[in-house]
Every structure is written in structure tokens, then in C-alpha cells.
Amino acid sequence: VSIGYHSVGRMKTLLDLMELPMPAGQYIAEYVWTDAKGKLRSKARTLMKTYEVATDFPKWNYDGSSTGQAPGSDSEVVLYPQAVFADPFRGSPNVLVMCDQYTPQGKPIPTNYRYDCAKVMEEAMEKGLEPWFGIEQEYFLIDSKTNKPVGFPFIGQPEPQGLYYCGIGASVMYGRDVVDAHYRACLYAGIKISGINGEVAPGQWEYQVGPTIGMESGDQMWMSRYILERIAEMAGYYVNLDPKPVKGDWNGSGAHTNFSTKPMREEGGFENYIIPALERLGKKHKEHILAYGAGNEERLTGKHETASIDSFKWGTADRGASCRVGHDTKNAGKGYFEDRRPAGNMEPYIVTKMIVSTCCEIPLPMKDFED
């Protein structure tokens, strides 16, 4: 690729500017939140004071009429900091701040899904259940010039799936630089990212976050998505989390959610806690499907390593089941299970809330949102 002299000079200047030292006692905090459509938004501010915990960071506000979360006549939405991460883009001492949103009167707005999730997790922790999660986020990297997954030809289709899963080599793997950069950036940020792998289609990848405890799961999933979007932006890509972005004989993208409680991880956990939890999930299958991501009916067809959206079943090592139990859990008589139904575009706060509520028999909170 030929790069002009002026492009090289411009890039060098930008990089040099990013390396300028920060003034003593000052740092940049990037506040991150989700809009009405579940898309990420962020803006930055200069802070001159350090804080021990996330909730001590100053609140901020934004124009909710520009994000579909407030009318223009009363557009102020207030950001409440909830989790803080090291900033891999600007480096230390700068930070990323995950926030949820409230009205000026202190009421959670309707798209603040974190609020109810926190109530359910708090009750689970008070009962000593210690809910653990491990979420497997599948996604496609899309070339912004072609609007196709990276590795897909401009005309026609690539070789059928089968070559790409955990593949090696330029003929089958596309976007690895973005994926590896994301992995390192998440580790730097303090996110509990536990692995990555290539998935079954060109340009499709997966990363895993966990084990995380309670509210860590939703906070870290959203921030990991933010970091991925920012890195993809640098490469001229965008990230697609939709459950079936490529039609035809291709797997979709899920967010398999591995789950356990403290009793499940102890002796007798399989018979006494995991099986009853799976039975409860089966009884509330429809409610969970409604909460597990838009467009999931295109993915959960009973093909491509999925169960049918219309029925619930669980099994040992069965990737065609709604929920899967590993041989290690069954043989040990304790451990965890995997809910394979959530779509790649699922809302982590909703999914983790629903799983804990159903499996641990914790009632969902009454609505307390601003009308």
C-alpha cells in the first residue's frame, strides 16, 4: 500500500501529540454509556482529583434528546459512574468510566438496565450465592468500505465454513491484529478477559470475559465492547454483534453465558442446584428468549450448533441444546452450566439479571423508572 508523504507526516504528528506528558495533577476520564438502541456513546473530561471508588467520581450529564433517551424540551440525562478501568488508549493515569443514567430527579431512565440488575445481584450476594459468569462474545469485524465481513470477497462467497475456526494463515484468518490488540487492551484496562479464538466464518471472532462476580459481568462486558469498537474504528472496521449478520449456511453470533453459584460449585451442586436451576430455566423459556437479544429467531433454528427457539432442552456436552453441561461438571458432581441461547447483541445487564432471578428464585424488581 502506497502512503503519501503528507499522510506519513500527519500520522507521525498525531502519534507525537498523543505521547505528550500530562500536566501534573490532571488526567482524562472518558465517560461511557449506552443509548436508547443499545449502542455505546462516550465523552471525555479533565479531572484534577483522584477517587478511591467509581461511585465517588463526579456525576456528569449529556443531551438525552440526541441519544433517544429524553425529549428536547427536557433533555438532560445524568451519568452516575459505576465502574472504572485503566484507559488503554491514553495510558496511565487516564481512565475509562462505565456509567448508568438517571433523570435530574435521581430516577433511573427506562433504558438504564443496570439499575434492576444491581438489585437482583445485591440480593444474591446477601444470600451468599456469589453468582459467577463467563460470557463468550462472538462478533464479526465488518469492512466499512465493503460493508461485508473482513475476508469476504466483494463479489460472491468465500469457501464454506470449516476452515476458519481457530485457523492459522492469511488465506483463512482476517483481522487478527485488531483481535490481539483488543485482548491486550482489555488486560491493561483490568477487564477479566480470559481468552480469544477465531470462529467458524471469515472475520468472525470470539472473546471470553470471566469468571466475573455479580455486577462485574455487565460492567466488564460493556467496557470490553467499547474497547473493541474503538480499536476496530482505528482499522476502518466496525463491529457487528447481530445474531445472524450473514445469511445462508453460516453460524450466527451468540453470547453463550456460563453461570454458577457458590452452592453449584460445592459438593452435590450438580444434583441439588444445577439440575433444579435448569428445570426453572425451562419453565421460563419464553420469558428468557424475549430478553436474550433482537433477531435471535434467525440464529436459534436447531441448526449451526443451536437449539430451536421454540423449545427448551439441556444436555451434557450437547452444543445443540439450549443449555449445556460439561462432562467435567457432571463427573465432578459440581461446577457450572452454559446457557447457549443469548444472542451476540444481548444486553448483559438484562441477561445476567434474568439468569440469577430465575435460577436463584429472586423476584424481579418492581418497575421504578421515570415515565
Image (cartoon, rainbow, N blue to C red):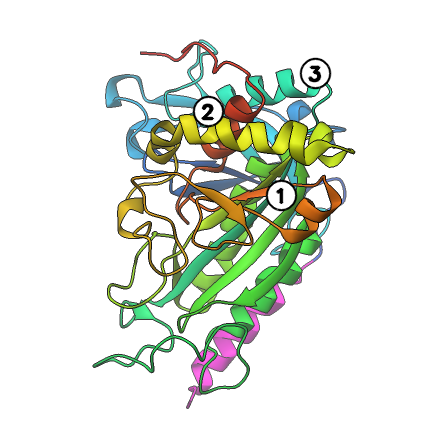
Amino acid marked by disc 2: Gln
Quadrant assignment, res 214: top right
* Residue positioned 66% across, 32% down in the render: 271
For the residue pair 11 and 234, the one nearer the viewer reads as 234
Task: Say which of marks 2 and 1 sits in front.
Answer: 2
Tally the marks. 3
Q: Which residue has dot 1 on it?
A: 28
The residue range painted magenta reads: 1-20
- One can see residue 26 in this view: yes
Picture disc at residue 42: none
- Name the N-terminal-most of marks 3 and 1: 1
Q: CA distance from mark 2 to mark 1?
A: 20 Å
Amino acid marked by disc 3: Lys
Q: CA distance from mark 3 to mark 2?
A: 27 Å
Q: Which residue has dot 3 on it?
A: 127
Q: Is residue 18 magenta?
A: yes
Tell me the SS state at disc 1: strand
Q: Horizontal and vertical percent for residue 42? A: 47, 41
Q: Quadrant of the N terminus?
A: bottom left
Q: Local crowd at mark 2 within 10 Å, few (<14), some, or many (≥20)?
A: many
- Name the N-terminal-most of marks 2 and 1: 1
